[in-house]
Image (tube, rainbow, N blue to C red):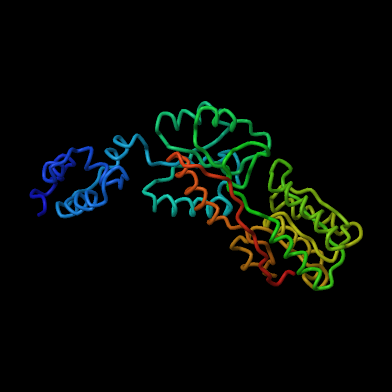
Amino acid sequence: MRPSGKNKRISREAIAARARVSPSTVSRALSDSPLLPETTRRRIKALALRLGYVPSHLGRSYYQGKSFRLGVVVPFSNRAVVSEYFSRMIYGMIAAAEKERYTVTVVADDGLPARDLATRVLSRSVDGLLFLNCHLKDRRFGELRGRGVPFVLLHHYVKNRPYLFLECDSEPGMRQAFVHLRDRGVRTVAYVAGNRQSVDALDRLALYRRFVRVFGFKSVRIVQGDYSRTSGQRAAGDILAGPVPQAVLCANDRMAFGLLEKLKERGVRVPEEMRIVGFDDQSVCTLISQKLTTIENPFEEIGRRAVRKLIEAIRGKPVLGERVSSRLIVRESA
């Protein structure tokens, strides 16, 4: 039976009257509440389908006390917002949120204090927060946790603090890179490091130093970059100024792109004279010459898992932080 009238909608109360239950029971059944027997849930859902019921997002939000929106906190003043780094993670978040009947809202962060971020959750504008591009000096997380705000840090964690996080595990991919270079006769290496305020950059630099020792390489130089393409271009001059390494590892692909550009201008043949390894596996890796050997950073998977963990935390379930493994992808540059 379908509702008569072009714009007439079947209400929750109408379904409740037909099913001879309360409207709140209908709400629980349509949201798969475990408080109801499965047979009751199936019966009410089948009746709603027959009647052409269209669920109201506002009604669902009201009766369950949630907005069913997640806030993705992105640094508004940082040009990196428009990069693939963010777009791929947000794509993974949207895909995972859709499966859980959540939506994703971008929160432009130009230094918002913790109380303002907390208000967005406590006022039910969003149910929890996902932080992108965190830095070591960010001190907002303790206050958010103290106020009971569910949140997840992406590509970031704070030592000795119980903050929920999703992080790329850089170790497997970097180990594979060193094995790959060793097997091709490389013995001298250099490194272009990332932003000192990034926990990822510090971890990757520590891994570089450790694997230099473990595999018996000689490190001729560490050049400080800031994850930008221009810092990779600048690094070329430093790398070519002294003993020239057989291979250079970069903390991300954007710096590797800049380095490749300048090496080409200086007549350095890659990979014959110098091998280059990036980190992230951005799509442009396969569009440049030479195609970049890099370490995959599973952006989309991290975004998906972060959403699932945040929703579990919102539901009051115990959740732990997680690292998602990286891997080496061999192409032409190394």
The percent coordinates of residue 3 (x first, y second) are 10, 50
Left or right, 303 with respect to 38, comes to right
Up-down: is 64 above or below 278?
Answer: above
Q: Quadrant of the C terminus?
A: bottom right
Left or right, 254 with respect to 89, comes to right
Q: Residue at x 74, y 57 (%)?
A: 250
Q: Residue at x 30, y 34 (%)?
A: 62
Q: Residue furthest right?
A: 243
Q: Quadrant of residue 243?
A: bottom right
Q: Quadrant of residue 127?
A: top left
Left or right, 68 with respect to 10, comes to right
The percent coordinates of residue 39 (x first, y second) are 23, 52
The percent coordinates of residue 269 (x first, y second) are 80, 71
Up-down: is 317 above or below 146?
Answer: below
Up-down: is 287 above or below 94?
Answer: below
The percent coordinates of residue 294 (x first, y second) are 68, 63
